Image (spheres, grey):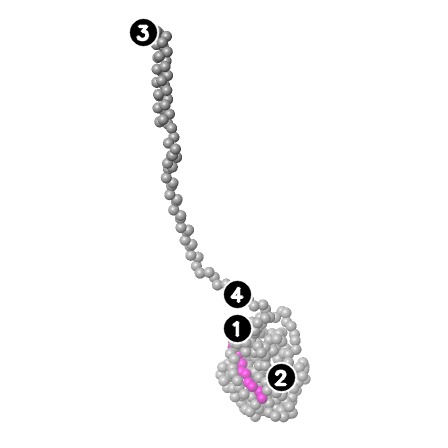
């Protein structure tokens, strides 16, 4: 029989062996296998949202073209008409044709009926006032013209004291071609001649007279540059004055005032490179 001391030692060894077996068993269960643990599957990326559709804003406005600088470009691109009053009036010399050479002349009247009859002026129809008229003494009945379309239109639209002021001026244009040796039959008053120095009877000695026109107060709204050309012989009207065309001009487009800029007067002369544009703008406006 083992002593109690030996039994105690054997029991302790038994307990130690049992403990060793338990530890070894736990270690085997918890030991790593050498492989990384499987990762959780990655989340699918969120679907990409389509960009929002642009809201239509309508058609883009057409680009605005810059206006051409003033004073440049052709006359057809500019308005040549002036306002009723020109506070910055600039004077420059107007050159009036002497009628010794071919020139375009103008005559203004207040009705289409008159305009149609004046395509072939007839001095037998001369009377005290109107398109074919005599002077205050009843002599020198003639056909009166001027060298600028604006002057002819002013005479119709803005002559002071005219009965029933018209709303429209009918301006006829003519080609004047003087006969050979005409200088002796033409009398010309110089520009600036005072009205008192215009002689009523000068027409008895000449077939045509040119002179400045300024009869106050009836002409106070007409250009200071107004020049008239009076033909006193039917033979000249028949053979040397050829009708060209008639312009229908609203009086609202016709400058009112003696201070009409000289540039306007010259634009209205048939020899001006701007004449066609100026005449069209008088008829149609700008």
Q: Are marks 2 and 4 in contact (CB under 8 Å)?
A: no
Element type where label 4 sits in the image = loop
Q: Image quadrant of residue 197? A: bottom right
**Mark 2 against mark 4, which lies toward the viewer?**
4
Q: On the image, numbered disc 1 is attached to which residue?
A: 285
Whichever of labels 2 and 4 marks the residue nearer the N terminus, that label is 4
Whichever of labels 2 and 3 marks the residue nearer the N terminus, that label is 3
Q: Image quadrant of residue 230? A: bottom right
Q: Which mark is residue 65?
A: 4
Element type where label 1 sits in the image = loop
Q: On the image, numbered disc 3 is attached to which residue?
A: 1
- Most extreme residue toward the front is 1
| Residue 74 position in % (x across, y down) | 56, 73
Q: On the image, numbered disc 2 is attached to which residue?
A: 97
Query: Could you tell whether 65 is left or right of 29 in the image?
Result: right
Separation of residues labelled 2 and 3 (CA atoms): 171 Å
Residue visible at 34% across and 6% down?
A: 3
Separation of residues labelled 1 and 4 (CA atoms): 22 Å
Residue visible at 37% across and 16% down?
A: 16
Q: Nearer the viewer, residue 198 or 108?
A: 108
Query: Could you tell whether 70 is left or right of 41 in the image?
Result: right
Q: Is residue 96 above or below residue 235?
A: above
The span picked out in magenta is 167-177
């Amino acid at each position: 029989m083992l002593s109690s001391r030996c039994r105690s030692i054997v029991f302790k060894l038994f307990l130690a062996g049992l403990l060793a077996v338990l530890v070894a068993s736990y270690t085997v269960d918890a030991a790593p296998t050498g492989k990384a643990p499987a990762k959780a599957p990655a989340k699918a990326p969120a679907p990409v949202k389509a960009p929002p559709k642009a809201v239509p804003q309508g058609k883009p406005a057409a680009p605005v073209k810059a206006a051409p600088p003033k004073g440049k470009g052709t006359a057809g691109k500019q308005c040549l008409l002036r306002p009723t009053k020109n506070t910055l009036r600039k004077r420059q010399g107007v050159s009036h044709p002497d009628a010794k050479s071919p020139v375009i002349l103008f005559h203004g009247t207040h009705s289409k009926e008159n305009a149609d009859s004046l395509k072939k002026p007839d001095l037998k129809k001369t009377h005290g006032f109107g398109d074919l008229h005599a002077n205050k003494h009843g002599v020198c009945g003639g056909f009166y013209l001027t060298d600028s379309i604006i002057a002819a239109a002013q005479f119709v639209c803005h002559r002071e004291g005219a009965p029933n002021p018209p709303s429209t001026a009918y301006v006829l244009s003519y080609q004047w071609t003087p006969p050979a040796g005409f200088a002796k039959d033409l009398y010309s008053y110089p520009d600036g001649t005072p009205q008192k120095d215009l002689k009523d009877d000068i027409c008895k000695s000449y077939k045509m007279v040119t002179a400045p026109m300024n009869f106050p107060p009836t002409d106070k709204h007409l250009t200071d540059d107004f020049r008239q050309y009076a033909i006193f012989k039917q033979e000249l009207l028949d053979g040397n004055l050829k009708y060209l065309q008639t312009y229908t001009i609203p009086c609202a487009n016709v400058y009112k005032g003696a201070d009409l800029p000289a540039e306007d007067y010259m634009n209205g002369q048939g020899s001006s490179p701007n004449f066609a544009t100026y005449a069209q703008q008088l008829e149609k406006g700008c």
